[in-house]
Amino acid sequence: MPINNQSSLNGFILLGFSNQPWLETPLFVIFLVAYIFALFGNISIILVCRLDPQLDSPMYFFVSNLSLLDLCYTTSTVPQMLVNLRGPEKTISYGGCIAQLYIFLALGSTECILLAIMAFDRYAAICKPLHYPIIMNHKRCIHMATGTWISGFANSLVQSTLTVVAPRCGRRVMDHFFCEVPALLKLACTDTRVNEAELNVLGALLLLVPLTLIMGTYIFIARAVMKIRSAESRWKAFNTCVSHLLVVSLFYFTAISMYVQPPSSYSHDRGKIMALFYGIVTPTLNPFIYTLRNKDVKVALQRALTKEFWVKIR
């Protein structure tokens, strides 16, 4: 028991790229720039979606929720990573590690469900245009978003608990940037096959069920789009889905690579690369994907740079 308490008292050591110290300064600069872009991009999307009346629709309500998720994602991991890259010690407290694990899992779980809801929103807009205002009314959108966040945090409570209870026998050195499920389970000093099986089932349900619903939804959307006679209208309908599909592809590719596998077969180098995409690259790219491919958001951002915009919302 005293040995098991050692990690609680001393926290964990995050090796990161300590075995390649020449990489630390370039990575510090890259992570810092990516974090600044993520903050700027996601805060801009949240503000313009909330303040611009032209973006007062269910689609942009959920986009602003996604940007809030991505903003929290990067903030839960990157500042600690920057401190460890520049500081002499590569440590994180036990409480900080558990909080980071819980928050990161909660946000990832929430995003899985949120992306499925965003696909349903596109389905309702394209396949049921006359009933869209009724199907996606403001009250229902609020309920769906609230349920998504609650479900994500509830799932994280279960997964993080299953991860934390595995005894580590004083092991506290993680070959990773931050605290996540596979890296923590690698520290376990007992057979973790039961933990792994339970986590894989939860991970598969949370990742594959929403992904299946998204794919099924887009089959119906594709059929509806192909029936549109006007090429211009067909392209406009298709274009509203492209940004969401890009975000789904980035998110699910990295998430499935990380979590739908036994942690005992977890590759440290592969895990680090996936973690970079999952925790930094994807949240940084998402606001720019929606900005660069969405005419309404680009116009709204241009309006936000004018004095008249801020005068009107006072």
Image: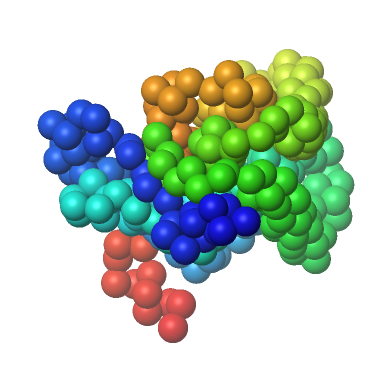
Drawn side of residue 127 relative to residue 277, left or right: right
* Residue ranking furthest to the front: 2
Residue 208, position in %: x, y? 75, 27
Quadrant in which the N terminus is drawn: bottom right
Drawn side of residue 272 relative to residue 106, left or right: left
Q: Is residue 136 visible?
A: yes
Q: Residue at x 45, y 34 (%)?
A: 275
* Residue ranking furthest to the bottom: 314
Residue 116, position in %: x, y? 72, 38
Quadrant in which the C terminus is drawn: bottom left
Counting labels gives 0
Q: Residue at x 43, y 77 (%)?
A: 312
Name the residue nearer the viewer: 160 or 128. 160
Residue 187, position in %: x, y? 53, 37
Drawn side of residue 40 relative to residue 96, left or right: left
Q: Residue at x 14, y 40 (%)?
A: 25
Q: Is residue 235 visible?
A: no
Name the residue nearer the viewer: 245 or 220. 245
